[in-house]
């Protein structure tokens, strides 16, 4: 058995682990939502802002090949994200829609620098079932394969109230209508003699007898 070769392989593996870049930690700070209530009416306008602080865990503040993703469930969302380096604005990213993708290159600096992202988003509360939670603002780190980095998700959540869904009118498909028929009894007529022809015959006989007697 070649023990020196095995030992060298183990040491090389440990060395690779030690020098491999470590994902940064992100922390959502100073989150503000207007209106401030936890339960918000569907269709109402919401404005939110927060700072995502980048806490380095390796030789740089953020891995260049990774991505910081901001997302929301608000409808008609409009974003403004600004990369801040030592308190100075380094990049501004305006975006419409549910997602903002910030390339790691914009966040990667020596660990001696202070890096953060200031984000603001506005939109309307989605129409969901009463009490359904929705994301106002979420920050998450993705690796170079587009997978979420473990424990990186930071989120601000609210719930929907006063849902404006309107009245749903049910439709009937293939519904049969039962017609109830009430039977009408047939009227039976019994045979008999009519008195009118009999009276006429008697009158004719009487007239003939009267004339014969004269």
Image (cartoon, rainbow, N blue to C red):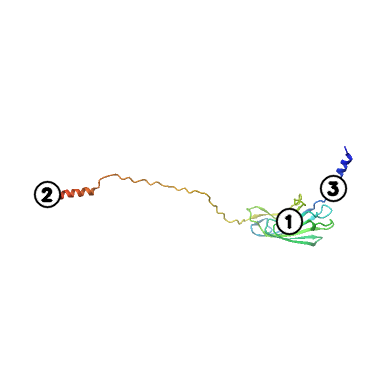
Residue 25 in the image: x percent, y percent?
A: 79, 53
Q: Is residue 106 left or right of residue 189?
A: right
Identify the secondary structure beneath mark 3: helix
Residue 52's tag is none
Q: Report which residue position mark 3 lands on.
A: 16
Mark toward the start of the polypeptide (1 vs 3):
3
When the figure is inspected, residue 81 is found, relative to residue 16, above or below; the finding is below
Q: How would you rate the neighbour count of disc 2 (Cα within 10 Å): few for under 14, some for 14-19, many for 20 or more?
A: few
> Tag 2 or tag 1, which sits nearer the N-term?
1
Q: Is residue 122 left or right of residue 167?
A: right
- Is residue 46 in sight in this rendering? no
What is the C-alpha distance between the residues marked 1 and 2? 132 Å
Image coordinates for residue 117, horizontal then vertical, percent: 77, 58
Residue topped by disc 2: 212
In front: label 3 or label 2: 2
Secondary element under disc 2, as helix, strand or loop, is helix
**Residue 26 percent location from the top left of the image:** 77, 54
Precedes in sequence: disc 3 or disc 2:
3
**Quarter holding the N terminus?**
top right
Residue drawn 12% across the image and 49% down it = 212
- Between 183 and 144, the residue placed more toward the observer is 144
Q: Which residue is mark 1?
A: 70
Kindly identify the residue that appears in the image at 76 percent across and 59 percent down.
Answer: 118
Assess whether mark 2 and mark 1 are in contact (beta carbons under 8 angstroms): no
Distance between the alpha carbons at the discs numbered 3 and 2 = 155 Å
């Amino acid at each position: 058995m070649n023990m020196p070769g095995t030992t060298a392989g183990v040491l090389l593996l440990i060395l690779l682990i030690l020098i491999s870049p470590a994902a940064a930690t992100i922390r959502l700070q100073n989150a503000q939502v207007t209106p401030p209530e936890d339960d918000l009416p569907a269709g109402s306008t919401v404005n939110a802002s927060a700072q995502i602080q980048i806490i380095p865990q390796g030789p740089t503040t953020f891995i260049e090949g990774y991505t910081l993703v901001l997302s929301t469930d608000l409808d008609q969302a409009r974003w403004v994200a600004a990369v801040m380096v030592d308190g100075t604005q380094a990049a501004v990213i305006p975006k419409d829609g549910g997602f903002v993708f910030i390339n790691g290159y914009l966040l990667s600096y020596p660990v001696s620098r202070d890096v953060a992202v200031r984000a603001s988003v506005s939109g309307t509360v989605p129409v969901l079932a009463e009490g359904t939670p929705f994301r106002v603002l979420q920050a998450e780190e993705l690796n170079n394969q587009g997978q979420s980095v473990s424990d990186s998700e930071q989120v601000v959540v609210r719930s929907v109230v006063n849902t404006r869904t309107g009245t749903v009118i049910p439709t009937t498909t293939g519904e049969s209508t039962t017609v109830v028929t009430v039977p009408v009894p047939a009227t039976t007529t019994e045979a008999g003699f009519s008195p009118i022809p009999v009276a006429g015959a008697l009158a004719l006989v009487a007239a003939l007898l009267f004339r014969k007697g004269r």
